[in-house]
Amino acid sequence: MAIKAGQINIHEPIGALKPTLIFPAGMPRSLDYLEKCRREGQPVIGSSSLPYDVCKPLYPAWAYLPYITDSTFRDALTKTIREHGLGMIYSPNPVVWNYLQRALKDIDSEVTLVNGSPVESELGDYRAALQHANKALNFPLSIASSHPLKAPVSELEIAILFKHGNVISGMCDDEKIAALCEIARHSPEGDLVEIGSWWGKSAFILAKLAQYYAIGNLLCVDPWKSEHLVQHDKGGLVDGGISQYDCEEALKVFIMNLLPYSRGDINYLRMPSTAAAATYKSGETVHSAAFGTTHYTGEIAILHIDGNHSEDAVRADMESWCERVKAGGWIIVDDYLWPYGDGPRHIADEYLEANHCRLSSAFVMGTALFMQISLEQSDAV
């Protein structure tokens, strides 16, 4: 049977790419979905009920639709479906989505909504964060710590860590966040130092925990220079992707992620780890244009090592900073389990062997190694 112009061919192969209508097209999630479709090569058509929508130029094609309260909306939608041969509709507006879910059943077409309920989508991350917080509070890690245990903060405060932390791109997974929550309760007062911050995900977690438990100020150390990204990983899979990153942009992203949470208790040094260690030892203040002036004690309560993962770099980080960790303080070696090389594990194992008499606790959570310096230290062996 011949298909007339304006009709949908219901026998078209499943694999054919039919356009997706994005309506309303100007909402933030609509624009995010537009970018997703562009990346995946999915044809799209934007649509709005505004006489002129400022987002119209962003779309390769456009279709005007009246408001869903208009008596002509259903006929206009049917006409748009047929004229453009639509396959799906994406709508992040909960009222529009609910209407379309009902209306599409009455329209003689195979067009469906590509997304689930916007309400469920909007609340999903919050609900997941609350579940993680509930688990962290009700099933805490059992740590053989030498430091007195602090009372936990509320479920909502822990949920903030998971919700806002997971908005920031990075490799700090939920298991590691849960472990950080617990060691913060077993931490003395002092500085928090992070070697390798990049976009700032784990830095955010450390900063909020430091505020929750009144631990101290956070210092982030990262050169944000491309030459320091070379890891010499096995097979070159990590080093092969270095060209994708813009270090100047990464620093801006770091500041954008951390500055809203700073209370004068966060700052950074843009320099290699060994140079930053010398700067840290020589003074008690750090100044930057973004964060102002931050004061430090010179004694580290939590040291998070997540810089360059080559053996030489990890060894230099630990030799430069571990001696500043105070009794009861923590040393975290990230990517102790790393599929692209053994640098962090080899150096951390050397430290464990040489300093086991000085440690009151050591465990692996996720891919990170956590070690606590005993309150009653003995000399390194």
Image (cartoon, rainbow, N blue to C red):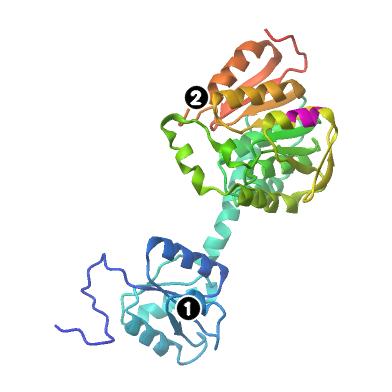
Q: Is residue 80 left or right of residue 171?
A: left
Number of residues whose C-alpha sits closer than 10 Å to that of mark 1, classed few (under 14), some (14–19) or many (20 or more): few
Q: Amino acid at mark 1?
A: Tyr
**Displayed quadrant of residue 63:** bottom left
- Would residue 78 be visible to someone looking at this image? yes
**Displayed quadrant of residue 171:** top right
Residue 109 on image: x %, y %? 31, 79
The verdict on residue 280 being magenta is yes
Camera-side mark, 1 or 2: 2
Q: Residue furthest left?
A: 1
Q: Main secondary structure of the magenta part?
A: helix
Residue 198 on image: x %, y %? 62, 43
Residue range highlighted in magenta: 277-281
Q: In front: 193, or 172?
A: 193
Residue located at (65% from left, 26% from top): 317
The residue labelled by disc 2 is: 342
Q: Is residue 371 left or right of residue 101?
A: right
Label annotation for residue 99: 1
Q: CA distance from mark 1 to mark 2?
A: 55 Å
Residue 86 on image: x %, y %? 35, 76
Q: Residue furthest front?
A: 227
Residue 295 on image: x %, y %? 85, 38
Note whether 229 is above or below 109 in the view shown: above
Quarter in which the N terminus is drawn: bottom left
Q: In front: 50, or 198?
A: 198
Residue located at (31% from left, 82% from top): 108
Residue located at (51% from left, 43% from top): 242
Q: Residue furthest bottom?
A: 71
Q: Amino acid at mark 2?
A: Asp
Q: Number of marks in the image?
A: 2
Q: Earlier in the sequence, mark 1 or mark 2?
A: 1
